[in-house]
Image: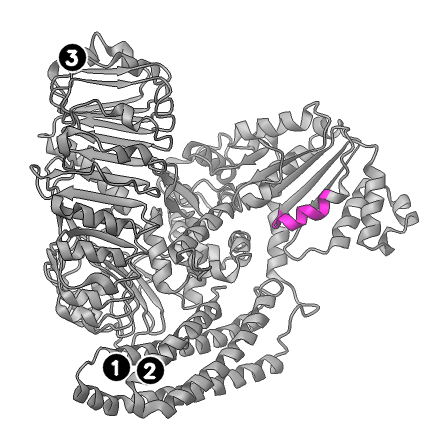
Amino acid sequence: MADTLYLVLRKVALFLGEAALEELGTELVEVASVRTDFEYRMKRTESELVILQAFIGQFNTHNVGDKTFEAWLGQVTNVAHQVEDIIDEYSFLTSQAAVINNFFKRKFHQAKSFAAWQSLSNQIDEVETRIQRISTMKDRYAISIGEPGKSSTLQNARQLSLSDSAYLSDDAELVGNASEIERLKQWLLSEQQDRSIMSILGMGGLGKTTIASRFYKNQQISRVFDCYAWVTLSQNYQVEGLMRQIMKQLIDQRSHMASGIEAMNHVGLIEELQSYLRDKKYLIVLDDVWDTNDWLFFNSALVRNNRGSRVLLTTRKKDVASVANDGFVVELKILPYTEAWHLFCQKAFRRLDDKICPVNLRPWAEKIVKKCQGLPLALVAIGSLLSYRELEEQEWSSLHNQLSWQLANSPELSWIMSILNLSLNDLPGYLKNCFLYCSLFPEDYKIRRRWICRLWVTEGLVEERGAGTTMEEVAECYLNELTRRSLLEVAERNVHGRARSFQMHDLVRDACLTVANREKFAVVYGASGINKVTSDARRLFVQKDARSLKVAAASQIRSFILFDTQVASSWIHEISSNFRLIRVLCLRFANIHQVPGVVSDLLNLHYLDLAHTKVKHIPASFGKLRNLQVLDLRFSYVEQLPWEITLLTKLRHLYVYMLHDVEERIFDCFSAAKLLGNICCLKNLQTLQCVSANKDMITQLGNLTLMRSLAIMKMRQNYIVELWGSLAKMPSLSRLVIFANSKDEVLNLVMLKSLPNLKFFWLRGRLYDGVLPQMFASFEKLATLKLDCCFLKKDPISSFAHMLNLVDLKLYKTYDGEQLKFRAGWFPKLSSLELGGMEHLNLIEIEECTMKVLHTLEMVGLMDLNAVPRGIMHIKTLQKMLLTDMPKEFIDRLQGADSYIVQHIPNIQSFESSNSEAVNKLVLLPHLAKKYGTGWWELS
């Protein structure tokens, strides 16, 4: 269930906080009495919603699936949304009053809006009445917690989770994860005498229970143990019940009756179990463990008797799996396509002798297998269902086209979703909405870490966790937790090993979309069979066919993200006029040349994304968007921001630049915007990219003490001291980009102190005396370093060697000399190295045992380098070598006499920058994918 109440209660707390009320009191004196009444009654409503939330929270783990409860819950959701509407209207009216500076205009506005404030009071009347009616309905229809006699879909689903092993009854049909299965077998049969613990980890439906069951029933394994037992945990297990289950399996019925097990409490049961197991070699399987506390209980009961006993856990959660002995966690993955196809055919065509898919059905069978994305549970269940159907194309095409509906509604398949939903039901309130949000992106979409974190924060889905942690950092904790719960998978990592993007399994996404639609959390238009948008949808993600979309003027949409880049600008301008209370507006890659006029009146806007549009001008009226937290203008044509932007005191992230040269060879490859006005008030700003330097702005930067990422272009030498003084006041600064005013501007950094927390530093510009400043000796945390156009006179490599955390080093026109040397032991973590534009470089010496984990080596335009550096042969970890505009003699030797040096590198690519097709394929598209994930141009 989408935790609607959790989100609405957060809004109530935020917007009825002291700051909002103080602002209301100072701006709207005439409506003070309305304000007081509004505050009192909203707090009373908040109390009612808190009680409802607690009541529903207990239901989540007992009666999920009860139709009466779900209908009643729908009424609660409607009331919660009405409260959200009141809060959003409240915020809008408050912001509207705040942006009126003229005294007479303010008085006129107060008189005009007085009726709107009174309307809020009337709406609270209606909410109170509806809450009373909901309470009466609860009693009338006897909706209560854990009512006896009513079945629980949650528990039914948990029982069904055991049945996936029934589908795989033969050893021959165990498909995939061969190495993991062999590891399990070797562990179970090993001669190690200590009691050891092993975990099988993976998302629901991967076959954890199936594999564990296969070993448990295997006579070769079972006969080496004196006794064995299997118990399946639930999210609401009872200690005594589980212990009795184990005891019943370990001892015979007569002993069981005589020992009085049924009458024992949990302490007595533990003592009895310890006594029984003390001198035995035992195997205990704990299936479907959800909480580390579950293991703490069993750990005390399962004695360490030094007889070679084994405990096997299956779980979806990494923290639970971590209780296993070091190295004894087996993580199951989805099956690769060939194995998925084989498993599906084994089930779907089991009545055929050869179990081979008929030619006429292959296109539809392939689509169904692709939809299952290697999930064994789905492949087996859908394949088994199809095995009873006629081998006719129409029959199979019909099931494929209705597959999402069938999975949600068909009794034969809906249990798959019930099993997948167990993980959703287990999520705490602060994670449920965040996880549902991930399902709104297109199928197979790689969700960028930074983007989803920004969206969650601006949506109000992230809670604060203390002054020392930003909400963006909390959002990253959410992502990590969803990954540990096997709900999201890391799709890509950057060179630092940090997750860059995440993916959600298609079937899990379908399950979430069903919930999101039912709970009115969001609608995904143009996919999953959704072709209409109701007026009460809260979020709208448009993936395709936007031209046919119509949104009512009274729309309750709070977030609009457009993936369809083919729609006309007139359509975008028209639909934007319906979003009065919108919070998130993303028009990235949209075909617009100017900002829709209505945007400046969207006073509740927290997130505005106009990246990769043709917008050139930002109007001064943007100063009214006082709630804006993120403004993304990357790769637009904006060259100047009005001074009114400095009024946006809640702004956290500001991006505004254009990249002119994706290969970054032109000195001014980025164009930065001029930011007018005094930026001292932007105290919440964490990201500022990229702005042109001027003396006043450089001095004012010191007021932005929360800054974490800063990019400054057009830097002059006479600003340097002031800049470093401002940077020293930014204790959390971790990313810094500085471009000199021109390629002839000389920057003197000799006397400057290091920035100890810097992790990313890109410096482009000629350095004083051609000498690397001493401060580079103190960059201990630096992970990425890019030095361009410095024209150093001395080999700089030794100056970087102490940077033990450096993983990415790029040197372009950095050095004017002839030789670079990489000594043994240097750069222990370096993963990516780029050397380019050093015209006189003719020798690169690489000793053995240097750069021991290097993955990618790129060389660009080293025109005097005619031989392949021999030391490359020592870097056995090298996977990719990219060569651009290298001398013909170098390429000839690479392919001839020096080929033995690089024979261990699987991916070597060479091209000329004049080859536009190669540049697009090898540089531009990877660059866009790195910044934005799946290209939006690929979705249209």
Closer to the camera, 100 or 146?
100
Q: Position of residue 510 (x, y in %)?
A: 42, 54
Q: Position of residue 703 (x, y in %)?
A: 27, 59
Check contact, mark 1 vs mark 2: CB within 8 A: yes
Q: Is residue 820 left or right of residue 253?
A: left
Label 2: state its secondary structure.
Answer: helix
Residue ID at (51%, 62%): 429
Does any portion of residue 789 appear in the rendered image?
no
Of mark 1 and mark 3, the one earlier in the sequence is 1
Q: Position of residue 380 (x, y in %)?
A: 52, 42
Of mark 1 and mark 2, the one earlier in the sequence is 2
The alpha-carbon separation of the residues under discs 1 and 3 comes to: 72 Å
- The residue under label 3 is which amino acid type? Asp
Mark 1 is surrounded, within 10 Å at the Cα level, by few (under 14), some (14 to 19) or many (20 or more) other residues, namely some
Residues in magenta, as a range: 289-299
Mark 2 is surrounded, within 10 Å at the Cα level, by few (under 14), some (14 to 19) or many (20 or more) other residues, namely many
What number is the disc on residue 892? 3
The alpha-carbon separation of the residues under discs 1 and 2 comes to: 8 Å
Q: Position of residue 113 (x, y in %)?
A: 26, 88
**Main SS of the magenta segment?**
helix
- The residue under label 1 is which amino acid type? Ala
Instruction: Reply above or below: 266 against 37.
Output: above
Most extreme residue toward the top is 897
Residue ID at (38%, 87%): 35
Does any portion of residue 929 appear in the rendered image?
yes
Residue holding disc 1 = 97
Residue holding disc 2 = 24
| Corner quadrant of residue 776 | top left
Residue ID at (61%, 83%): 140
Label 3: state its secondary structure.
Answer: helix
